């Protein structure tokens, strides 16, 4: 499992300026520490999920700067 | 991503554009988008060329890199050069020139400057290097502020005392108010930033509709999102309505992310005023760490110049950021100021209006109708 900071940053684009949000599928959740292992673009990374309620494996969350800010509901994934 | 194909479908674009054209007959509208991501989408997908010529899209100060004053870069470089410091920063901040060079220059001269994708990465570096002082250069609007807030809460919980935040987070709403009060800018609506709104919700924009009588439509980032948002604004004008509407309903909720807002409130407070490059001082538009987090506040631990540095006289980034001129109307665009040799931050950041136009918009048919010769003398080419 790759840590967030180990992801290759080959394009140097600006996370803040693009307001980049990445879709991530939750694989495992560490409820105690508010962290989760997710899959982003075929990579497994660890992110903070403390700003969302009841994060569970299988859920799709939206990630900015290593932190899950929102989740996509089931109907949006259908 | 699930939505890429659906929201880039050219067949769906045509009826939306036809409706925009029908509803905007006899009506000229100047609409501002405030997010670097929207600027990028508009230029990359040639959206201006699809819209009728009566719809003018102007680009506002949606790039946090672009609006950061040079003096703050100098302070960052000063911190990076200090002994025993590991200075961490997001992407484009590495290349932004201050009056004493950029963070990249500082790194080339031996400073330990590292690119991170998240403040949590910087905290991890602090954990791994307990004898060093790790500073995170915190920039960005409300989309990014929660990640810094969460990191500060973790640093406090874990008692990590060698981690510091150089807080330069900015707030969108005061900047919008400053633009609305600007005498040389007459706008007919806003394409609102989708991901800032994911955090702050839609209510903070209501004053724009109620007091300034301008429509606001919160937009997603795919081409059809932007086109649909333009359609929604044009419809409001056609129907004589003014409202805040949410085109990005698949992501943005009216209340925003309450926990994210609470985390920000716990860790940061509003500065009395903050300088925006090109826009001047805007009250209550920047954030600093609360007193309870003084132990992690870089400004309280590292002495820096705190000087205000004026921009080059040739730089017209301020006018571009306010939407008063287009990138190609800047006197040094494409000549002295290019992505390789940027004078102003609108060209340094890859999401700045000037860089976005240089990379994509030069091929736009609309700009060609008013094209300035990029690689020769600046002169207007007749239609």
Image (tube, helix red, strand yellow):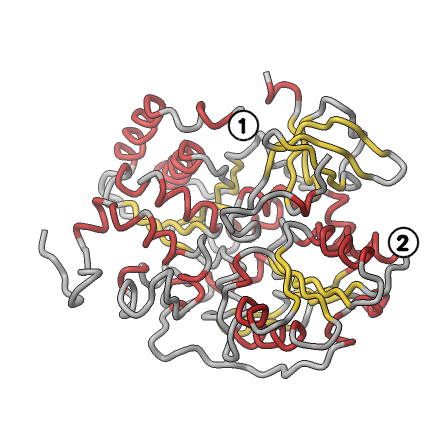
Mark 1 burial class by Cα count in 10 Å: few <14, some 14-19, many 20+: few
Q: Nearer the viewer, residue A42 or B139?
A: A42
Q: In the drawing, what numbered circle is on residue B47?
A: none
Q: Is residue A14 above or below residue B94?
A: above
Q: Is residue A63 visible?
A: yes
Q: Is residue B183 visible?
A: no
Chain bearing mark 1: B
Among the 4 quarters of the image, the one containing residue B71: bottom right
Q: Position of residue B46 (x, y in %)?
A: 31, 40
> Secondary structure under badge 2?
helix
Q: In the drawing, what numbered circle is on residue B157?
A: 2
Chain bearing mark 2: B
Q: Earlier in the sequence, mark 2 or mark 1?
A: 1
Give the residue at mark 1.
Answer: B1
Left/right of residue B201 with respect to residue A50 in the rendered view? left
Q: Nearer the viewer, residue B178 or B94?
A: B94
Residue at image location 65% in from the left, 47% down from the top: A65
Both labels 2 and 1 in a single chain: yes
> In the picture, which quadrant includes the N terminus of chain B?
top right
Q: CA distance from mark 2 to mark 1?
A: 35 Å
Left/right of residue B348 with respect to residue B194 in the rendered view? left
Q: Is residue A64 above or below residue B173?
A: above
Q: Is residue B84 above or below residue A8?
A: below
Residue at image location 53% in from the left, 36% down from the top: B246
Among the 4 quarters of the image, the one containing residue B136: bottom right
Left/right of residue B17 with respect to residue A63 in the rendered view? left
> Secondary structure under badge 1?
loop
Does the CB distance between marks 2 and 1 fall below 8 Å?
no
Residue at image location 36% in from the left, 23% down from the top: B12
Q: Position of residue A21 (x, y in %)?
A: 58, 40
């Amino acid at each position: 499992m790759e840590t967030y900071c180990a992801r290759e940053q080959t394009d140097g684009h600006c996370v803040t300026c693009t307001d980049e949000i990445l879709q991530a599928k939750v694989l495992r959740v560490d409820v105690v520490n508010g962290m989760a292992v997710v899959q982003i673009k075929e990579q497994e990374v660890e992110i903070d999920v403390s700003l969302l309620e009841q994060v569970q494996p299988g859920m799709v969350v939206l990630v900015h700067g290593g932190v899950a800010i929102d989740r996509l509901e089931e109907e949006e994934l259908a | 991503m699930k939505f890429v194909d659906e929201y880039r479908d050219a067949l769906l674009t045509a009826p939306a554009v036809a409706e925009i054209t029908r509803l905007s007959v006899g009506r000229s509208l100047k609409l501002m988008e405030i997010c670097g991501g929207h600027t990028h989408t508009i230029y990359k997908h040639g959206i201006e060329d699809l819209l009728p010529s009566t719809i003018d899209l102007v680009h506002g100060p949606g790039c946090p890199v672009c609006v950061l004053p040079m003096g703050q870069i100098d302070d960052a470089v000063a911190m990076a050069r200090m002994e025993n410091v590991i200075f961490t920063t997001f992407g484009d901040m590495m290349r932004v020139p201050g009056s004493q060079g950029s963070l990249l220059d500082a790194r080339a001269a031996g400073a330990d400057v590292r690119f991170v994708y998240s403040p949590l990465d910087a905290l991890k570096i602090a954990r791994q290097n307990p004898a060093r002082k790790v500073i995170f250069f915190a920039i960005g609007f409300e989309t990014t502020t929660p990640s810094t807030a969460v990191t500060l809460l973790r640093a406090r919980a874990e008692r990590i005392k060698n981690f510091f935040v150089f807080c330069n987070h900015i707030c969108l709403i005061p900047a919008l108010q400053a633009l609305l009060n600007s005498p040389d800018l007459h706008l007919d609506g806003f394409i609102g930033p989708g991901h800032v709104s994911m955090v702050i919700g839609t209510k903070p924009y209501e004053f724009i509709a109620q007091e300034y009588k301008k429509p606001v439509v919160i937009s997603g980032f795919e081409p059809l999102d932007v086109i649909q948002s333009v359609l929604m604004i044009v419809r409001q004008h056609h129907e004589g309505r003014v409202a805040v509407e949410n085109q990005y309903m698949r992501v943005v909720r009216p209340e925003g992310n309450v926990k994210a807002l609470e985390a920000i409130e716990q860790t940061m407070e509003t500065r009395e005023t903050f300088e925006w490059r090109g826009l001047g001082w805007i009250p209550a538009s920047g954030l600093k760490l609360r007193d309870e987090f003084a132990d992690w506040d870089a400004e309280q631990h590292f002495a820096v110049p705190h000087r205000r540095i004026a921009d080059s006289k040739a730089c017209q980034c301020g006018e571009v950021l306010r939407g008063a001129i287009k990138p190609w109307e800047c006197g040094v665009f494409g000549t002295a100021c290019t992505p390789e040799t940027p004078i102003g931050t609108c060209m340094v950041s890859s999401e700045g209006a000037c860089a976005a136009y240089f990379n994509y918009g030069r091929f736009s048919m609309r700009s060609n109708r008013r094209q300035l010769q990029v690689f020769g003398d600046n002169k207007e080419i007749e239609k």
